[in-house]
Image (cartoon, coloured by chain):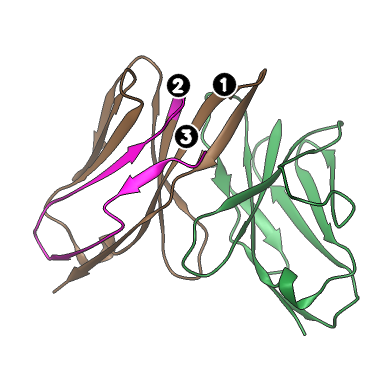
Amino acid sequence: GAVVSQHPSWVICKSGTSVKIECRSLDFQATTMFWYRQFPKQSLMLMATSNEGSKATYEQGVEKDKFLINHASLTLSTLTVTSAHPEDSSFYICSARRGLADTQYFGPGTRLTVL
Amino acid sequence: QQPVQSPQAVILREGEDAVINCSSSKALYSVHWYRQKHGEAPVFLMILLKGGEQKGHDKISASFNEKKQQSSLYLTASQLSYSGTYFCGTEAYTSGTYKYIFGTGTRLKVLA
């Protein structure tokens, strides 16, 4: 149980285009979903936390207009990287959890390359 | 502030033991441990909750010292499959909300 999927796994796009990444909890309802980005050989950096039906809470330094997060249901959250640039290239990982004392279950990640 | 893990990196031979520490400057509600292989998402190992506890399964165990705001992960009789980067994830109550932050990471390499 507690499986989280992400789609797509890999995406290569041209500079200036927008990319949407989906995160789904397949066998549980997630009250909270998290979005992280990870650069090579570095730790995961939390970008935002989203609760179903409410606006996402962004971490300091993360542009909310550039990284649009929508948490439409208890099983789906999306991250849209708008007007992507090469510096946005990274490994984006989502996680989901059922409640406060629960751990986070991670999706397999999406590797974004912006040319 | 990001929890600090030590050591930053360690190389072991198969069968050796290792301890990875995670230290936070904030009072912690919980500590989670993960292992991440290159190019993959982190895999959950265990969670320790406030109240100070120890947990373990197989040859991997952990402790949580609430007073010191520290947690340690113990790997005994290491196997090749233990190689990867270990992260602690800490949850602390800050400014009216629970914040989740990953530690700096510890790279572990087990050699045959």
Picture quadrant where residue B85 is located: bottom left
Q: Position of residue A54 (x, y in %)?
A: 86, 31
Upstream in sequence: badge 2 or badge 1: 2
Q: Is residue B25 magenta?
A: yes
Q: Colour of chain B?
A: brown
| Residue A30: x %, y % from top left | 69, 35
Distance in Å between CA atoms under marks 2 and 1: 8 Å
Residue of label 2? B27
The disc label shown at residue B90, or none = 3
Q: Tell which circle, 3 or 2, labels the residue nearer the N-terminal end.
A: 2
Residue A90 seen in render: yes
- For the record, the magenta segment spans B1-30
Q: Is residue A90 left or right of residue B110?
A: right
Kindly indicate which chain is depicted in green in the rendered structure. A
Screen quadrant of the C terminus of chain A: bottom right
Three-letter amino acid code at disc 1? Tyr
Check contact, mark 2 vs mark 1: CB within 8 A.
yes
Locate residue A55, reporting x and y percent: 86, 35
Circle 1 sits in a helix, a strand or a loop, which is it? strand
Residue drawn at (67%, 43%), measured in percent from left and top?
A34
Residue nearest the observer in this picture, A25 or A115:
A115
Between marks 3 and 1, how big is the CA–CA gap?
10 Å
Q: Amino acid at mark 2?
A: Ala
Figure check: A81 above or below B74: below
- Name the side, left or right, on which B99 lies relative to B83: right
Give above or below for A106 relative to A39: above
Horizontal side of residue B78 vs A58, given as left or right: left
Judged left or right of residue B11, residue B43 is right
